[in-house]
Image (cartoon, rainbow, N blue to C red):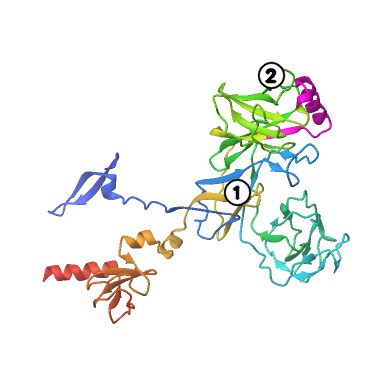
Amino acid sequence: MSDYQILTVEQTTGGGLALRRKDVDEVVSPGASPVITAASGFPLILGDAAEGRKFLSVRIPFDPAQAGAGDPSPSNIRKLTPRTPAFYRCGANLYTGAGDTPNTGYNAQGVIGASSMGIRITDHIPVSGESEVVLLIWGAPSTNRAVRAGAYDAEGTMLNGGALILDGGGPSGFFIYRVTLPAGTATIRVSLYGPLNLGVYAGSAAESLTLTLPDGSVGGGVWDPVNGTLTVDRLYKSLDGTERWSSGGTSGTDKAYFYLVIGAGGSVVNGSGICSHFMPVNITGSTTDVGQRIVNSSADNARLLIRPENVAAADVDIFKDWLAAQAAANTPVQVCWKLAEPAVYTVDAGTVAALSGVNTLFHDAWESGAGYDVAAEYVQDTGAAIEAANADTRAMIGEASGETASRSLAVGEYVTVGAALYRVTAAIAEGETLVPGSNVVETTVGAELVRLAGMLAQ
Protein backbone atom coordinates (compact mmCIF):
# COMPACT_ATOMS: atom_id res chain seq x y z
CA MET A 1 0.00 0.00 0.00
CA SER A 2 1.24 3.47 -0.91
CA ASP A 3 2.20 6.02 1.76
CA TYR A 4 0.36 8.70 -0.25
CA GLN A 5 -3.31 9.37 -0.97
CA ILE A 6 -5.02 11.57 -3.54
CA LEU A 7 -8.54 12.95 -3.98
CA THR A 8 -10.53 11.61 -6.90
CA VAL A 9 -13.84 12.68 -8.41
CA GLU A 10 -16.20 9.77 -9.05
CA GLN A 11 -19.73 9.41 -10.33
CA THR A 12 -22.23 8.03 -7.79
CA THR A 13 -24.97 5.52 -8.48
CA GLY A 14 -27.48 8.34 -8.68
CA GLY A 15 -25.44 10.15 -11.33
CA GLY A 16 -23.94 12.78 -9.06
CA LEU A 17 -20.27 13.49 -8.38
CA ALA A 18 -18.44 12.75 -5.16
CA LEU A 19 -14.94 13.20 -3.82
CA ARG A 20 -13.14 10.05 -2.74
CA ARG A 21 -9.80 9.69 -0.97
CA LYS A 22 -7.80 6.77 -2.40
CA ASP A 23 -4.33 5.33 -2.10
CA VAL A 24 -2.12 6.34 -5.02
CA ASP A 25 -1.63 2.68 -5.93
CA GLU A 26 -5.37 2.39 -6.58
CA VAL A 27 -5.28 5.21 -9.10
CA VAL A 28 -1.84 5.17 -10.68
CA SER A 29 -0.40 1.88 -11.84
CA PRO A 30 3.15 1.44 -10.57
CA GLY A 31 5.81 1.64 -13.30
CA ALA A 32 7.44 -1.56 -14.42
CA SER A 33 10.79 -2.23 -12.83
CA PRO A 34 13.70 -1.98 -15.27
CA VAL A 35 15.36 -5.19 -16.35
CA ILE A 36 18.83 -5.24 -14.79
CA THR A 37 21.37 -7.57 -16.32
CA ALA A 38 25.08 -8.26 -15.97
CA ALA A 39 27.79 -9.24 -18.41
CA SER A 40 31.57 -9.48 -18.59
CA GLY A 41 34.25 -9.75 -21.23
CA PHE A 42 37.17 -7.95 -22.83
CA PRO A 43 36.33 -5.86 -24.59
CA LEU A 44 32.80 -6.04 -23.20
CA ILE A 45 30.38 -5.49 -26.08
CA LEU A 46 26.75 -4.76 -25.19
CA GLY A 47 24.09 -4.57 -27.87
CA ASP A 48 21.09 -4.40 -25.54
CA ALA A 49 21.79 -1.52 -23.12
CA ALA A 50 18.96 1.00 -22.73
CA GLU A 51 20.02 4.26 -24.37
CA GLY A 52 20.68 7.08 -21.94
CA ARG A 53 20.37 4.90 -18.84
CA LYS A 54 23.28 5.02 -16.42
CA PHE A 55 25.40 1.94 -15.84
CA LEU A 56 24.78 0.58 -12.35
CA SER A 57 28.33 -0.67 -11.87
CA VAL A 58 31.51 -1.29 -13.84
CA ARG A 59 34.26 -3.45 -12.35
CA ILE A 60 37.82 -3.11 -13.63
CA PRO A 61 40.49 -5.40 -12.13
CA PHE A 62 44.14 -4.34 -12.29
CA ASP A 63 47.60 -5.31 -11.07
CA PRO A 64 50.96 -3.56 -11.45
CA ALA A 65 52.60 -3.89 -14.84
CA GLN A 66 55.81 -5.90 -14.82
CA ALA A 67 58.39 -5.37 -17.54
CA GLY A 68 60.50 -8.03 -19.18
CA ALA A 69 60.27 -11.81 -19.02
CA GLY A 70 61.76 -14.70 -17.10
CA ASP A 71 62.67 -15.00 -13.43
CA PRO A 72 63.46 -11.64 -11.82
CA SER A 73 66.96 -11.29 -10.40
CA PRO A 74 69.51 -8.49 -9.84
CA SER A 75 70.83 -9.34 -13.31
CA ASN A 76 67.32 -9.56 -14.85
CA ILE A 77 65.47 -6.67 -13.27
CA ARG A 78 61.74 -6.72 -14.05
CA LYS A 79 60.47 -3.30 -13.11
CA LEU A 80 57.04 -2.99 -11.46
CA THR A 81 54.86 -0.03 -12.42
CA PRO A 82 51.71 0.69 -10.39
CA ARG A 83 48.81 1.32 -12.73
CA THR A 84 46.26 4.11 -12.83
CA PRO A 85 43.71 2.41 -15.11
CA ALA A 86 41.72 4.36 -17.67
CA PHE A 87 38.18 3.24 -18.55
CA TYR A 88 36.74 3.69 -22.03
CA ARG A 89 33.12 3.56 -23.17
CA CYS A 90 32.82 3.66 -26.95
CA GLY A 91 30.47 2.58 -29.69
CA ALA A 92 30.59 -0.29 -32.16
CA ASN A 93 33.76 -1.78 -33.66
CA LEU A 94 33.98 -0.39 -37.20
CA TYR A 95 36.80 -2.69 -38.27
CA THR A 96 35.77 -6.00 -39.83
CA GLY A 97 39.19 -7.34 -40.80
CA ALA A 98 38.22 -7.52 -44.47
CA GLY A 99 40.53 -6.19 -47.14
CA ASP A 100 43.83 -6.14 -45.21
CA THR A 101 46.96 -6.05 -47.33
CA PRO A 102 49.95 -7.97 -45.89
CA ASN A 103 53.56 -6.77 -46.06
CA THR A 104 52.38 -3.23 -46.78
CA GLY A 105 52.18 -0.14 -44.58
CA TYR A 106 52.83 3.57 -44.13
CA ASN A 107 56.37 4.82 -44.07
CA ALA A 108 57.58 7.75 -41.98
CA GLN A 109 56.32 10.19 -44.63
CA GLY A 110 52.82 8.73 -44.65
CA VAL A 111 53.27 7.03 -47.99
CA ILE A 112 51.97 3.50 -48.46
CA GLY A 113 54.55 1.01 -49.68
CA ALA A 114 55.88 -2.51 -49.40
CA SER A 115 57.31 -3.67 -46.08
CA SER A 116 59.40 -6.68 -45.19
CA MET A 117 58.77 -6.38 -41.44
CA GLY A 118 55.42 -8.17 -41.27
CA ILE A 119 53.46 -4.90 -41.35
CA ARG A 120 49.92 -4.97 -42.73
CA ILE A 121 47.55 -2.17 -43.69
CA THR A 122 43.78 -2.21 -43.43
CA ASP A 123 41.35 -1.38 -46.16
CA HIS A 124 39.44 1.91 -45.84
CA ILE A 125 37.39 1.79 -42.63
CA PRO A 126 34.22 3.97 -42.83
CA VAL A 127 34.15 6.53 -39.99
CA SER A 128 31.89 9.18 -41.54
CA GLY A 129 30.22 11.33 -38.91
CA GLU A 130 32.75 10.49 -36.20
CA SER A 131 34.98 13.19 -34.72
CA GLU A 132 37.06 10.66 -32.82
CA VAL A 133 37.75 6.94 -32.86
CA VAL A 134 39.53 4.74 -30.36
CA LEU A 135 42.07 2.16 -31.50
CA LEU A 136 42.43 -0.94 -29.32
CA ILE A 137 45.49 -3.01 -30.24
CA TRP A 138 46.64 -6.18 -28.51
CA GLY A 139 48.64 -9.32 -29.07
CA ALA A 140 52.02 -10.89 -28.42
CA PRO A 141 54.75 -8.52 -27.18
CA SER A 142 56.81 -7.18 -30.03
CA THR A 143 59.43 -4.55 -30.67
CA ASN A 144 57.77 -3.93 -34.08
CA ARG A 145 55.10 -1.79 -32.52
CA ALA A 146 54.77 1.30 -34.76
CA VAL A 147 51.12 2.05 -35.49
CA ARG A 148 50.12 4.65 -38.06
CA ALA A 149 46.74 5.87 -39.23
CA GLY A 150 45.73 7.96 -42.22
CA ALA A 151 42.50 9.96 -42.53
CA TYR A 152 40.77 10.34 -45.94
CA ASP A 153 37.82 12.31 -47.30
CA ALA A 154 35.03 10.81 -49.42
CA GLU A 155 37.14 11.19 -52.58
CA GLY A 156 40.03 9.26 -51.05
CA THR A 157 42.30 12.26 -50.49
CA MET A 158 44.45 12.07 -47.34
CA LEU A 159 43.50 14.89 -44.98
CA ASN A 160 46.22 14.84 -42.37
CA GLY A 161 49.20 15.54 -44.61
CA GLY A 162 50.67 12.14 -43.88
CA ALA A 163 49.90 9.27 -41.56
CA LEU A 164 49.42 9.98 -37.90
CA ILE A 165 52.46 8.54 -36.14
CA LEU A 166 51.34 6.73 -33.01
CA ASP A 167 53.95 5.62 -30.49
CA GLY A 168 53.45 1.97 -29.60
CA GLY A 169 54.85 2.40 -26.10
CA GLY A 170 56.53 -0.55 -24.39
CA PRO A 171 56.65 -4.15 -25.53
CA SER A 172 53.53 -5.24 -23.65
CA GLY A 173 51.57 -5.83 -26.83
CA PHE A 174 48.54 -3.88 -25.58
CA PHE A 175 47.85 -0.28 -26.56
CA ILE A 176 44.93 2.17 -26.63
CA TYR A 177 44.93 5.31 -28.76
CA ARG A 178 42.33 8.05 -29.05
CA VAL A 179 42.50 9.53 -32.54
CA THR A 180 40.91 12.91 -33.31
CA LEU A 181 39.76 12.91 -36.93
CA PRO A 182 40.13 15.96 -39.21
CA ALA A 183 36.88 17.57 -40.36
CA GLY A 184 35.47 15.81 -43.41
CA THR A 185 37.02 12.43 -42.62
CA ALA A 186 35.10 9.63 -44.31
CA THR A 187 37.51 6.71 -43.86
CA ILE A 188 40.74 5.80 -42.14
CA ARG A 189 43.42 3.21 -42.84
CA VAL A 190 45.67 1.76 -40.14
CA SER A 191 49.02 0.03 -40.58
CA LEU A 192 50.43 -2.09 -37.78
CA TYR A 193 52.55 -5.13 -37.08
CA GLY A 194 50.85 -8.19 -38.56
CA PRO A 195 50.30 -10.43 -35.51
CA LEU A 196 48.63 -7.67 -33.49
CA ASN A 197 44.84 -7.54 -33.24
CA LEU A 198 42.98 -4.33 -34.03
CA GLY A 199 39.65 -2.77 -33.05
CA VAL A 200 38.47 0.63 -34.27
CA TYR A 201 35.66 1.81 -32.01
CA ALA A 202 33.21 4.58 -32.86
CA GLY A 203 31.54 7.02 -30.54
CA SER A 204 33.28 9.68 -28.56
CA ALA A 205 35.41 8.45 -25.70
CA ALA A 206 35.26 11.87 -24.06
CA GLU A 207 33.63 10.26 -21.05
CA SER A 208 36.60 7.98 -20.46
CA LEU A 209 37.66 8.04 -16.82
CA THR A 210 41.06 7.58 -15.16
CA LEU A 211 41.64 6.32 -11.64
CA THR A 212 43.51 8.52 -9.19
CA LEU A 213 45.17 6.31 -6.59
CA PRO A 214 44.55 7.33 -2.97
CA ASP A 215 48.27 6.86 -2.19
CA GLY A 216 51.44 5.26 -3.53
CA SER A 217 50.93 2.00 -1.67
CA VAL A 218 48.16 0.73 -3.96
CA GLY A 219 49.37 -2.19 -6.05
CA GLY A 220 46.13 -3.51 -7.47
CA GLY A 221 42.49 -4.29 -6.93
CA VAL A 222 39.11 -3.65 -8.51
CA TRP A 223 37.98 -0.17 -9.52
CA ASP A 224 34.36 0.82 -10.08
CA PRO A 225 34.43 4.22 -11.82
CA VAL A 226 30.63 4.46 -11.79
CA ASN A 227 30.11 4.02 -8.04
CA GLY A 228 33.42 5.58 -7.02
CA THR A 229 34.85 2.60 -5.15
CA LEU A 230 38.33 1.11 -5.18
CA THR A 231 38.76 -2.30 -3.57
CA VAL A 232 42.49 -2.64 -2.92
CA ASP A 233 43.73 -6.22 -2.68
CA ARG A 234 47.44 -5.63 -3.41
CA LEU A 235 49.93 -3.26 -1.80
CA TYR A 236 53.12 -1.93 -3.36
CA LYS A 237 56.42 -0.71 -1.94
CA SER A 238 59.61 0.63 -3.51
CA LEU A 239 62.65 0.06 -1.29
CA ASP A 240 65.53 2.51 -0.87
CA GLY A 241 67.45 1.20 2.16
CA THR A 242 66.02 3.66 4.66
CA GLU A 243 63.58 1.07 5.98
CA ARG A 244 64.06 -0.60 9.38
CA TRP A 245 65.53 -3.90 8.23
CA SER A 246 66.45 -6.74 10.59
CA SER A 247 68.25 -10.03 10.10
CA GLY A 248 66.70 -13.40 10.74
CA GLY A 249 67.59 -17.06 10.74
CA THR A 250 70.71 -18.56 12.32
CA SER A 251 72.61 -16.82 15.10
CA GLY A 252 75.88 -14.92 14.85
CA THR A 253 77.06 -13.38 11.60
CA ASP A 254 75.71 -16.20 9.41
CA LYS A 255 72.27 -14.77 8.75
CA ALA A 256 69.75 -16.63 6.57
CA TYR A 257 67.78 -13.59 5.37
CA PHE A 258 66.79 -9.99 6.03
CA TYR A 259 63.24 -9.00 6.90
CA LEU A 260 61.07 -5.91 6.98
CA VAL A 261 57.82 -5.60 8.94
CA ILE A 262 55.22 -4.41 6.42
CA GLY A 263 51.99 -4.78 8.40
CA ALA A 264 50.36 -6.05 11.54
CA GLY A 265 47.60 -8.49 12.27
CA GLY A 266 48.47 -11.25 9.81
CA SER A 267 46.98 -9.27 6.91
CA VAL A 268 48.79 -10.76 3.90
CA VAL A 269 48.46 -13.85 1.74
CA ASN A 270 51.52 -15.99 2.37
CA GLY A 271 53.83 -16.30 -0.61
CA SER A 272 51.91 -13.73 -2.69
CA GLY A 273 54.84 -11.38 -3.34
CA ILE A 274 55.99 -10.35 -6.80
CA CYS A 275 59.28 -8.47 -6.99
CA SER A 276 61.44 -6.64 -9.47
CA HIS A 277 64.71 -8.29 -8.36
CA PHE A 278 63.83 -11.61 -6.68
CA MET A 279 61.64 -14.57 -7.48
CA PRO A 280 59.38 -16.14 -4.82
CA VAL A 281 61.06 -18.85 -2.70
CA ASN A 282 60.25 -20.55 0.60
CA ILE A 283 62.69 -18.74 2.86
CA THR A 284 63.37 -20.45 6.21
CA GLY A 285 65.96 -20.06 8.94
CA SER A 286 68.36 -22.39 7.16
CA THR A 287 67.44 -21.63 3.56
CA THR A 288 70.04 -21.18 0.87
CA ASP A 289 67.64 -20.15 -1.91
CA VAL A 290 67.99 -16.61 -3.20
CA GLY A 291 64.66 -14.81 -3.42
CA GLN A 292 61.84 -13.14 -1.51
CA ARG A 293 58.79 -14.20 0.45
CA ILE A 294 55.77 -12.48 1.96
CA VAL A 295 54.66 -14.18 5.15
CA ASN A 296 52.54 -13.69 8.27
CA SER A 297 55.12 -14.27 11.00
CA SER A 298 54.65 -15.90 14.39
CA ALA A 299 54.89 -12.43 15.90
CA ASP A 300 51.63 -11.62 14.14
CA ASN A 301 53.39 -9.12 11.91
CA ALA A 302 53.34 -9.40 8.15
CA ARG A 303 56.91 -9.48 6.88
CA LEU A 304 58.86 -9.23 3.66
CA LEU A 305 61.81 -11.66 3.70
CA ILE A 306 64.70 -11.30 1.23
CA ARG A 307 67.75 -13.50 0.86
CA PRO A 308 70.26 -11.97 -1.61
CA GLU A 309 73.45 -13.58 -2.90
CA ASN A 310 76.26 -14.04 -0.33
CA VAL A 311 73.98 -13.13 2.54
CA ALA A 312 76.21 -14.92 5.04
CA ALA A 313 79.04 -12.49 4.39
CA ALA A 314 76.79 -9.45 4.66
CA ASP A 315 75.08 -7.62 7.49
CA VAL A 316 72.02 -5.41 7.58
CA ASP A 317 73.95 -2.21 6.84
CA ILE A 318 75.60 -3.73 3.78
CA PHE A 319 72.22 -4.92 2.53
CA LYS A 320 70.69 -1.48 3.11
CA ASP A 321 73.56 0.15 1.25
CA TRP A 322 72.91 -2.19 -1.67
CA LEU A 323 69.22 -1.25 -1.67
CA ALA A 324 70.14 2.44 -1.64
CA ALA A 325 72.53 1.94 -4.57
CA GLN A 326 69.78 0.21 -6.58
CA ALA A 327 67.41 3.10 -5.90
CA ALA A 328 70.08 5.67 -6.84
CA ALA A 329 70.59 3.84 -10.15
CA ASN A 330 66.83 4.17 -10.86
CA THR A 331 66.38 0.41 -10.49
CA PRO A 332 64.89 0.22 -6.98
CA VAL A 333 63.86 -3.11 -5.52
CA GLN A 334 60.07 -3.13 -5.78
CA VAL A 335 57.61 -5.57 -4.25
CA CYS A 336 53.86 -6.07 -4.42
CA TRP A 337 51.83 -8.45 -2.26
CA LYS A 338 48.24 -9.57 -1.79
CA LEU A 339 46.11 -8.64 1.21
CA ALA A 340 44.10 -11.29 3.00
CA GLU A 341 41.32 -8.76 3.57
CA PRO A 342 40.95 -6.11 0.83
CA ALA A 343 40.47 -2.48 1.85
CA VAL A 344 37.75 -0.34 0.23
CA TYR A 345 38.38 3.32 -0.63
CA THR A 346 36.03 5.99 -1.93
CA VAL A 347 37.31 7.65 -5.11
CA ASP A 348 35.86 10.06 -7.64
CA ALA A 349 32.82 8.69 -9.46
CA GLY A 350 31.73 9.46 -13.00
CA THR A 351 28.36 9.23 -14.74
CA VAL A 352 28.47 6.86 -17.69
CA ALA A 353 25.29 6.51 -19.70
CA ALA A 354 24.67 3.95 -22.43
CA LEU A 355 25.02 5.02 -26.04
CA SER A 356 22.39 4.26 -28.62
CA GLY A 357 23.11 0.90 -30.21
CA VAL A 358 26.30 -0.95 -29.38
CA ASN A 359 28.29 -0.05 -26.26
CA THR A 360 31.89 -1.26 -25.96
CA LEU A 361 33.63 -1.11 -22.58
CA PHE A 362 37.34 -1.72 -21.98
CA HIS A 363 40.30 -0.48 -19.95
CA ASP A 364 44.05 -0.10 -20.39
CA ALA A 365 45.16 -2.34 -17.51
CA TRP A 366 44.49 -5.55 -19.41
CA GLU A 367 47.02 -8.40 -19.39
CA SER A 368 46.97 -11.64 -21.30
CA GLY A 369 45.22 -14.36 -19.30
CA ALA A 370 42.20 -14.66 -17.06
CA GLY A 371 41.07 -12.11 -14.51
CA TYR A 372 41.15 -8.82 -16.41
CA ASP A 373 37.66 -8.74 -17.97
CA VAL A 374 35.35 -5.77 -17.57
CA ALA A 375 32.17 -6.65 -15.64
CA ALA A 376 29.12 -4.40 -15.80
CA GLU A 377 25.57 -4.15 -14.49
CA TYR A 378 23.23 -2.15 -16.69
CA VAL A 379 19.61 -1.49 -17.58
CA GLN A 380 18.61 -3.69 -20.48
CA ASP A 381 16.60 -2.19 -23.31
CA THR A 382 12.97 -3.21 -22.77
CA GLY A 383 12.51 -4.41 -26.32
CA ALA A 384 15.71 -6.41 -26.17
CA ALA A 385 14.64 -7.99 -22.89
CA ILE A 386 11.34 -9.07 -24.44
CA GLU A 387 12.91 -10.27 -27.69
CA ALA A 388 15.51 -12.24 -25.76
CA ALA A 389 12.73 -14.48 -24.41
CA ASN A 390 14.76 -15.07 -21.30
CA ALA A 391 14.64 -18.71 -20.23
CA ASP A 392 13.84 -17.84 -16.63
CA THR A 393 10.86 -15.77 -17.76
CA ARG A 394 9.66 -18.48 -20.15
CA ALA A 395 9.93 -21.06 -17.36
CA MET A 396 7.19 -19.21 -15.47
CA ILE A 397 4.88 -19.76 -18.47
CA GLY A 398 5.84 -23.20 -19.64
CA GLU A 399 8.66 -25.71 -19.52
CA ALA A 400 11.44 -24.89 -21.98
CA SER A 401 11.95 -27.52 -24.65
CA GLY A 402 13.74 -28.15 -27.88
CA GLU A 403 11.99 -29.40 -31.01
CA THR A 404 12.41 -32.93 -29.61
CA ALA A 405 10.67 -33.81 -26.36
CA SER A 406 13.15 -34.40 -23.54
CA ARG A 407 10.46 -36.31 -21.59
CA SER A 408 6.97 -37.69 -22.12
CA LEU A 409 4.37 -34.92 -22.47
CA ALA A 410 0.67 -35.34 -21.69
CA VAL A 411 -2.24 -33.62 -23.39
CA GLY A 412 -2.81 -30.18 -21.90
CA GLU A 413 0.78 -29.51 -20.82
CA TYR A 414 2.57 -26.36 -21.97
CA VAL A 415 6.09 -26.04 -23.39
CA THR A 416 8.06 -23.15 -24.87
CA VAL A 417 10.29 -23.53 -27.89
CA GLY A 418 12.33 -20.39 -28.51
CA ALA A 419 9.97 -17.48 -27.86
CA ALA A 420 6.77 -19.41 -28.70
CA LEU A 421 4.33 -21.10 -26.30
CA TYR A 422 2.72 -24.43 -27.27
CA ARG A 423 -0.10 -26.51 -25.78
CA VAL A 424 0.24 -30.27 -26.14
CA THR A 425 -2.79 -31.67 -28.04
CA ALA A 426 -1.68 -35.30 -28.40
CA ALA A 427 0.50 -37.38 -26.09
CA ILE A 428 4.19 -37.14 -27.01
CA ALA A 429 6.73 -39.77 -26.01
CA GLU A 430 10.27 -38.89 -24.97
CA GLY A 431 12.38 -38.33 -28.07
CA GLU A 432 9.43 -37.60 -30.40
CA THR A 433 9.35 -34.43 -32.47
CA LEU A 434 7.02 -31.56 -31.56
CA VAL A 435 4.94 -30.87 -34.68
CA PRO A 436 2.74 -27.74 -34.61
CA GLY A 437 -0.76 -28.55 -35.85
CA SER A 438 -0.27 -32.24 -35.11
CA ASN A 439 0.71 -32.90 -31.48
CA VAL A 440 1.12 -29.29 -30.31
CA VAL A 441 -0.56 -26.01 -31.15
CA GLU A 442 1.02 -22.58 -30.85
CA THR A 443 -0.82 -20.31 -28.44
CA THR A 444 -0.44 -17.35 -26.08
CA VAL A 445 -1.07 -16.85 -22.38
CA GLY A 446 -4.00 -14.59 -23.16
CA ALA A 447 -5.59 -17.09 -25.52
CA GLU A 448 -5.27 -19.84 -22.95
CA LEU A 449 -6.87 -17.72 -20.23
CA VAL A 450 -9.82 -17.00 -22.50
CA ARG A 451 -10.11 -20.68 -23.43
CA LEU A 452 -9.98 -21.82 -19.81
CA ALA A 453 -12.48 -19.15 -18.73
CA GLY A 454 -14.86 -20.37 -21.42
CA MET A 455 -14.53 -23.97 -20.24
CA LEU A 456 -15.28 -22.96 -16.65
CA ALA A 457 -18.37 -21.00 -17.71
CA GLN A 458 -19.98 -24.03 -19.41
Secondary structure beneath disc 1? Answer: loop
Nearest the viewer among 103 and 441 is 103
Location of the C terminus (image quadrant):
bottom left
Q: Position of residue 132 (x, y in %)?
A: 70, 56
The residue carrying mark 1 is: 372
Task: Look at label 1 and name its amino acid.
Answer: Tyr
Q: Residue at x 62, y 43 (%)?
A: 62
Q: Main secondary structure of the magenta part?
A: helix
Q: With 389 as the anchor, is 109 left or right in this view? A: right
Nearest the viewer among 111 and 354 is 111
Nearest the viewer among 125 and 293 is 293
Task: Look at label 2 and name its amino acid.
Answer: Ser
Q: Quadrant of residue 278 in the image? A: top right
Magenta residues span: 312-335
- Distance between the Cα atoms at labels 2 and 1? 45 Å
* Magenta stretch holds residue 168: no
Q: Position of residue 283 (x, y in %)?
A: 65, 31
* Magenta stretch holds residue 328: yes
Secondary structure beneath disc 2? Answer: loop
The residue carrying mark 2 is: 251
Q: Which residue is outermost to the left?
A: 458
Q: Quadrant of residue 272 in the image? A: top right
Against 223, residue 130 (above or below) is: below
Location of the N terminus (image quadrant):
top left
Q: Residue at x 40, y 61 (%)?
A: 390
Q: Position of residue 180 (x, y in %)?
A: 74, 55
Q: Residues within 10 Å of mark 1 (few under 14, many from 20)?
A: many
N-terminal of the pair, mark 2 or mark 1, is: 2
Q: Which residue is outermost to the top?
A: 252
Q: Are marks 2 and 1 in contact (CB under 8 Å)?
A: no
